[in-house]
Amino acid sequence: MYDITNYDIIKDDVNDVFQVRTKANVFLISFDDPEKQELFAVFCDLVKGNKVSYQKIYRELTSRYAEDKVLDVLSELKEYELLPQEINQLAFDETGITEEATAYLARFKKSILFIGGDKLGVPFVEKAKREGYTSVSHLNRKNCDFEAIEAGMAAADFIIVDGYEYNPSLLKLINELAIRLDKPWLLVGGIEGTELNVGPMFYAKETGCYECLHRRRLSQDEGLAFNQVYHQHLEDKELTGQPDQFIDNGILIDLTLNYVFIEMSKYLAEWSVPETWKAMLLIDLFSYKMRKHHLLKVPYCESCNPQVRHNLAPWLEAVTLK
């Protein structure tokens, strides 16, 4: 772990980057958005010489800047282990009256919506109630129309979307509504072959959208010719595909939901940057090894452009180590 407070930070106007450095080692940090540059500079001022929790930093930054931009900057710093040590630790005391503890408990009153089938939806609602969430609802595509989905998404603080019982027409609809309503949502792929799939978390102004993810995955799909026909068949007929099965299916669904609830807690209680922010987590069912695939915005995406500002060279890292 590098910890940004152990480095000198200078704004290099000559090369249009921030240098985070010691005498010999340097990180070069660049942002394609002037507001993110400003946000990063404010972040550096807040942590310089101060021991401050993630919640306090998050609250301070989101009081000045859009939440999705704050998460985007913090996620980049977390990815390269540049967050100060205090920000990577929980900051709750035994009395339970700190601002952090209050935020942690307040998450139970947030409105949570699950959209999808019963295989994930029913155990999700049951688990949410056991965990203490008081406002949880489940919309099954078979029993609801466009107006119900739109109204449910508009009222929700956070949305979980079923990608296990795969319905491309439903995902397309949710993607379009989430962009228009400016709503954060987490895609849950569940069991896929011999892996569990969780993420990405979308907040389309900064992350890109589901259509970006779909097109990126197609570009790496070895069975593209067959999968495109299957996808089009499901979309044209507004059908839900058959989900993958594996040994101890119920246990694996429960394990998937545990990841979902941790990610949901991170976001709603504001105690850490979610690992699924602009990223898909794949957990191997044999070795338990985890792979993390980052979501890249597609330039000129037909779904989220022009609402989303795109980086025309998304393969270039925001942070580089020299």
Image (cartoon, helix red, strand yellow):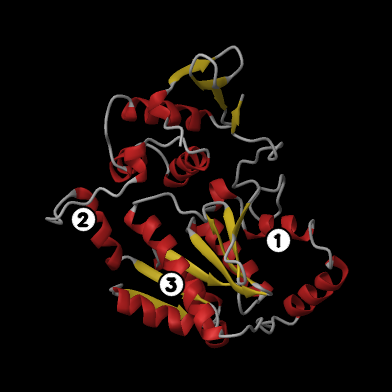
How busy is the neighbourhood of tag 2: few (under 14 within 10 Å), some, or many (20 plus)? few
Structural distance between the alpha carbons of marks 3 and 1: 23 Å
* Placement of 306 over or under 16, stated as above or below: below
Farthest residue, direction right: 225
Identify the mark nearer the N-term, 2 or 1.
2
Q: Is residue 105 left or right of residue 233?
A: left
Q: Amino acid at mark 2?
A: Thr
SS type, badge 1: helix
Q: Amino acid at mark 1?
A: His
Farthest residue, direction top: 14
Image location of residue 205, percent across then percent down: 54, 48
Return the mark for residue 102.
2
Image location of residue 21, percent across then percent down: 50, 20
Residue 47: tell me if it is visible. yes
* Placement of 92 over or under 72, stated as above or below: below
- For label 3, the residue is 113
Q: Residue at x 36, y 75 (%)?
A: 128
Q: Is residue 191 left or right of residue 153?
A: right
Q: Is residue 232 left or right of residue 121?
A: right
Quadrant (top left, top right, bottom left, bottom right) of the N terminus: top left
Identify the mark nearer the N-term, 3 or 2.
2
Residue 63: tell me if it is visible. no
Number of callouts in the render?
3
- For label 1, the residue is 214
Q: Amino acid at mark 3?
A: Leu
